[in-house]
Amino acid sequence: MKIFSKLIFISILMLNTVSVQAQENIKLKYDFKAGRKLNYEVIINGDVNIEVKPSDGKHVPRNSAGMQGKFAYTHEIASVSGDGTLAEINVIYGQSYMNTIVNDQVIPNTDVPHLNGKIARVTVTNEGKISDFELPEGLPASLQNADFKKMFLIFPKRGLRVGESWIESSESVNDDNENLSITNTLNSTHTLLGIEKKGGYECAKVKVLTTTSTITKSKNARVKFNGKAQGRVEGIIYFELDSGHIVHSDLNTKINNVVVTQAAQDGKNQNEDVPEITTILDTNLKTVTKLL
């Protein structure tokens, strides 16, 4: 009986210990170390469907295409401030490609390989906020719209228990372009699912659900251009506990983009009705990022 009672007592202690551990706060943080290099590979697969609908009722066949790509890059932590709150990071691109596949024909994007050897520079706080970034010189025009502001997930200042979430929301209006006004909104919910080993690292496993909306309106009265893009990103990211860097992520992205355009009227036909053209673009992507 004594042995039996002792076993029950030990079991209760173990259950209490597990309960306490499950309730412990886990603090997610970035700990940048000058000189550290992290090599990544990103694999992208997906498809895009395009539908054009003129207001005059003319039929335009729906088109679809596949997408596949691979991007290689290195995060090189160039410097860290004395108090560790600010880091400058070089994003060094390696061999990359992006292909469109139409009717089993592979059509390479000729601009993406130009990334090889290019270096972007990013300044980030230890909370994950991008305070400044600089694109590489000599990029083709199609690659000059990169935005590094969301390159790092902003961790909460508080500790988290397993199962807890934190939310990020933002809205911005860009009127710098003389022809277009752009409004962006973002809502993200991140949930700590637990602590797991991934690629030999002790990681925080985080579920991500992000919705975005971009509304674009023309400022030019003679040319109608209204666009609305709605996106949804859902998946899992593994963050190394000690440093905060990404070890692995698997994300699914869906984007619905609807654009309504109307050509400018010239002096010869300004009394005629100019048809609107509605273009619907649906994109589905699976993106897997790996720390090599």
Image: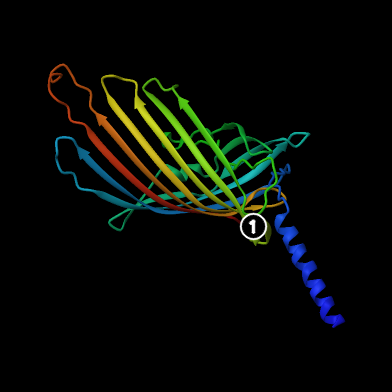
Q: Position of residue 201 (x, y in %)?
A: 68, 58
> Residue beneath label 1, please?
194
Q: 71 or 53: which is nearer to us?
A: 53
Q: Badge 1, how many Cα within 10 Å: few under 14, some, many 20+?
A: some
Residue at 82% across, 81% down: 4
Q: Which x, y percent locates residue 29?
A: 69, 45
> Residue placed at 44% from the left, 46% from the top?
232
The picture places residue 17, in percent across and down from the top left corner, at 77, 63
126 up-or-down from 69: above or below: above
Asked whether residue 228 appears in the rendered view, the answer is yes
Report the quarter where the N terminus lies.
bottom right
Can you see residue 145? no
Q: Is residue 275 left or right of residue 89?
A: left
Q: Which image quadrant is residue 280 in?
A: top left
The correct choice, above or below, for 270 with respect to 40 in the image is above
Which quadrant would the C terminus be assigned to in this image? bottom right
- Residue type at mark 1? Gly
Can you name the residue that lies furthest to the right here? 2
Q: Is residue 8 above or below residue 254?
A: below
- Mark 1 falls on what kind of element? strand
Tell me if 114 is positioned left or right of 277 in this view.
right
Q: Residue at x 18, y 35 (%)?
A: 55
The image quarter in which residue 236 lies: bottom right
Side of 249 relative to 77 (left or right): left
User: For this rendering, which residue is in front, 244 or 15?
Assistant: 15
Find the residue positioned furthest to the front.
Answer: 1
Q: Position of residue 226 (x, y in %)?
A: 32, 30
- Check the image and tell me how it is coloured: rainbow
